[in-house]
Image: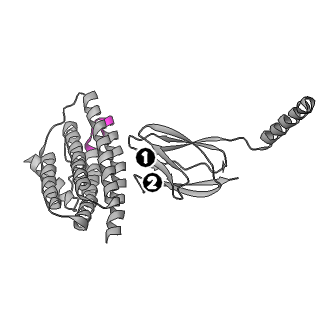
Amino acid sequence: MGAMKAIYAPVIVTGLLLAIGTAAPAAEYQIVVANMKFAPPPDQLHLGDVIIWRNDDIFHHTATARDASFDIDLPAKSEARMTIEYVGAVEFYCRFHPTMTGKLNVQP
Amino acid sequence: MFKNILAATFLLGLAGTAAIAADAKISDPQIAHIAYTAGQIDVTAAEQALKKSKNTDVIEFAKTMERDHKAVNDQALALVKQLKVTPEDNQISKSLNAQATKELAKLGALDGSAFDKAYIDNEVAYHKAVNSALADQLIPSAKNAKLKSLLETGLALFKEHQMHAEHLAAMMK
């Protein structure tokens, strides 16, 4: 049995390496909040990408999904990281300042 | 006399006619005082709303007013300290305070949805008037670049507040 394990182990490792190799690498994007506006989000967003929400304002904001899939708290002069977990279009807004809005378009 | 004209002009602006003298001269210490006073008035109005209202939307709005106007005023205090400027009380600040005291008393006599509606309607009118004063008088008159920049930040914020209040007012009709 011990010999069997030794043979299978490298096969499993190779399989994992292949799986990692074929997936698109996760990208990191920054969305700045300044002067009571969200900067436009990047066009090409994919599942697993990371968004860094950066609040440059002296006011407390949030980045909140209309479908409740995320709710990021952004105190004045702060930033927060968020990994994209859903595919599709999602509109977001600031809970404190509802006229501040934007939209993420996430592809698989 | 000149100060009275300024005060009258500002109040006319508040009344909605926005007749503001283009060549009005106000000093930076006076502008700082007016801007701070205007913010403080809205914080006090929000505190009153938080005591009286039971409407979730109105309460959330009032909390935002309190939080945001305090944030601007904290920056204003830090700035005048940094610039070693003493804000100077003036006729416009006095008129604003007198007007606000009347409004607080008027709103204080109302309850329930009558209070909510009057508070939000006043927030629309107040932000509109302050925004006109900022855009047409205070920002163009400010000499110091940092003060001007803070006033511009305030204007971007208060415009959002005005739209937010207008949206709430429309929902209450």
Which residue is disc 1 drawn over? A61
Which residue is disc 2 drawn over? A100
Cα distance in 3D space between marks 1 and 2: 9 Å
- Judge the density around disc 1: few (<14), some (14-19), many (≥20) Cα neighbours within 10 Å: many
In the foreground, A2 or A63: A2
Residue at the front extreme, as displayed: A1
Q: Which mark is residue B86?
A: none
> How many numbered circles are shown?
2
Q: What amino acid is labelled 2 in the image?
A: Met
The answer to if B143 sits in the magenta stretch is yes
Asked if residue B6 shows in the view, the reply is: no
- Judge the density around disc 2: few (<14), some (14-19), many (≥20) Cα neighbours within 10 Å: some
Q: Which chain is disc 2 placed on?
A: A
Q: Where is residue B119 in the image (x, y as percent from the top left)?
A: 24, 60
Residue at the left extreme, as displayed: B1
The answer to if B57 sits in the magenta stretch is no
Q: Contact (CB < 8 A) between labels 1 and 2?
A: yes
Q: Where is residue B124 in the image (x, y as percent from the top left)?
A: 28, 60
In the foreground, B122 or B110: B110
Image: B18 above or below B31: below
**Range covered by the magenta-colored residues:** B140-147
In the foreground, B15 or A92: A92
